Amino acid sequence: MTTVDLPLLPLGRGSDRLSERGVECPGDLPAVSDPDLVARARAAKAALGDRVFVLGHHYQRDEVIQFADVTGDSFKLARDAAARPDAEYVVFCGVHFMAESADILTGPQQQVVLPDLAAGCSMADMARLAQVEDAWDALVDAGVAEQVVPVTYMNSSADIKAFCGRNGGAVCTSSNADVALEWAFEQRGPGTKVLFLPDQHLGRNTAVLKMGMSLDDCVVWNPHLPGGGLTVEQLRDARMVLWKGHCSVHGRFTADVVDRVREEVPGVTVLVHPECTHDVVTRADLVGSTEFIIKTVEAAEPGTAWAIGTELNLVKRLAAAHPDKRVVFLDKTVCYCSTMNRIDLPHLVWALESLVAGTVVNRIQVDADTEHWAKVALQRMLDLPGRSHRD
Ligand code: SF4
């Protein structure tokens, strides 16, 4: 009998990432996993008891989120994990940068596990440390680096957070980006500039809509062009240097779909995440983080209609949880976050059963120096005046 190589490693065993091609994006969720896996996940979790703490990001699939001890956005989850120092293992059902943040904020006795190492984030991957260091060198050459404060969105790798920590900058989330920018602009006097990483849309939307800047105050640094595609004069004149990064999910909403949903759903309120483009955000009625979106829909009157511009797993759960309101996805053609969806039940079962067997798989561990400086940048965010820290 001949064996056939499967295109997927159903239980995540092995390390051949090339054979795990990721979740297709067919416009609907992949098929529900084998129902036996539910019983296996339950049994493994019960066997581990309080030794394991399972975190589920809002964008995770239903089959995974049902096993989460807490749900939330990335920063809330990292803090939740830190508040459970008794949990030996933290299984992070989310993406890589989130697991890194959890490792940074949890104690050395805790081990953070990401059930599928291929669960990255396209936005975080758009800012590599070497690229950011090149940009910083260009700012030095332009004679402006001393006026620049780097601020990175939570959705960035640990080494980018550490870069910000080392260079007098901070981390921000989508709900405190304005407070973080206010803080940053106070750091270097009247000529202060901010290098905002890695999401150009969050940076632009915050600068223009919350800080009263104009679009002309912002320039975009393209890491794939010499000198970022900017002249020295542009760097000197800019107040915001936006990194050319974006979320592949939120970046796909267009202004047209906002207009269309208003025609199709009478009285609809359009509520979008600030990772959406400036065009979309300026056409929407409300803009806010995932936590803001959830709370707004929860507090809405029965009979109201909502078009939500964020990841589809969350929108579907909101619609199911609020049958007395009409909750629609802003754009029928937008996919789920494919990397978030890499965490499926088979991978979760594999991670949990491995822990039961005494093997820690897919541990995410940030080196001590990176952790130190990333913590400095995170602490500067925590020290910002009064605002909940949600992304
Ligand atoms: S939704 Fe966007 S920002 Fe969030 S993990 Fe997916 S690609 Fe990254």
Image (cartoon, rainbow, N blue to C red):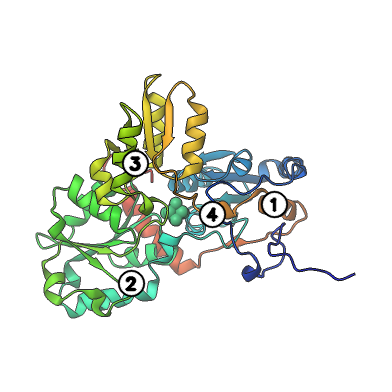
70 relative to 3, above or below:
above
In the rendered view, does 83 fall on the left or right side of 357?
Answer: left
Distance of mark 4 from mark 2, alpha carbons?
31 Å
Q: Secondary structure at mark 2?
A: helix
Distance of mark 1 from mark 4, alpha carbons?
18 Å
Q: Secondary structure at mark 4?
A: loop
Indicate which label's residue lies in the foreground, 3 or 1.
3
Badge 3 or badge 2: first in the primary sequence? 2
Badge 2 or badge 1: first in the primary sequence? 2
Q: x%, y% of residue 306?
A: 37, 31
Quadrant of res 307: top left
In the rendered view, does 186 fall on the left or right side of 1?
Answer: left
**Residue behind mark 1:** 346
**Residue behind mark 2:** 132
Let me know if residue 17 appears in the view. Answer: yes
Distance of mark 3 from mark 2, alpha carbons?
29 Å
Indicate which label's residue lies in the foreground, 4 or 2.
4
**Residue behind mark 4:** 25
